[in-house]
Image (cartoon, rainbow, N blue to C red):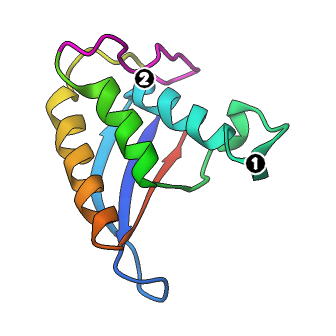
Amino acid sequence: MGLDQYLFVEECADEEATEVFYWRKHPNLHGFMTAEWLSLPENEGKSPGDFNCQRLYITAEIVERLDACTRPNAQKGLPPTSGFFFGESDGYYDEQDRKAVEFMRGAVERGQRVYYDSWW
């Protein structure tokens, strides 16, 4: 048991998504994505626990906010996040986070649909 996190890309809406990144127990990234999901108007009144197995489609604005949090020596990093079986973010995924940001940026610019999903 634990926090499993995925980033998928779809070339177009009628194609099957492809997993491009996977994280295991990186709760601070999950906390960032949860806050983004909760900020969507359609999720008003929902709680962080409602984000389990829900997709967050990535926009250019989300990429820019994530970029600002994951840059080396960022003033404001990813938000400290905890949860039952979430583990701890300890820097292990820093390089992968940066690669994921660059992937997301390029995919969004190309018009591909990118989404984050998680399960715990």
Residue under the image location 53 percent in, 45 percent down: 119
Say which quadrant the C terminus sits in: top right
Tell me which secondary structure the magenta stretch mostly adopts.
loop
Q: Is residue 50 above or below residue 47?
A: below
Contact, mark 1 vs mark 2 (Cβ under 8 Å): no
Mark 2, Cα crowd under 10 Å, few <14 / some 14-19 / many 20+, is many
Q: Earlier in the sequence, mark 1 or mark 2?
A: 2
Secondary structure category for the residue under label 2: helix
Q: Is residue 75 magenta?
A: yes
Q: Amino acid at mark 2?
A: Asn
Rendered location of residue 103, percent (x, y): 22, 55
Q: CA distance from mark 1 to mark 2?
A: 23 Å
Secondary structure category for the residue under label 1: helix
Q: Amino acid at mark 1?
A: Pro
Within the image, what quadrant is residue 44 found in? Answer: top right
Residue under the image location 29 percent in, 54 percent down: 104
Left or right side of 110 for 42: right
Which sits in the foreground, 65 or 19?
A: 65
* Residue matched to label 1: 41
Left or right side of 23 for 15: right
Q: Is residue 68 above or below residue 39?
A: above
Rendered location of residue 5, percent (x, y): 41, 44
Mark 1 vs mark 2: give the one in front: 1
Residue under the image location 22 percent in, 18 percent down: 91
Q: Is residue 98 magenta?
A: no
Rendered location of residue 49, percent (x, y): 70, 34
Which sits in the foreground, 95 or 83?
A: 95
Rendered location of residue 112, percent (x, y): 35, 72
* Part of the protein shown in magenta: 73-86
* Residue matched to label 2: 28
Can residue 2 be seen here?
no
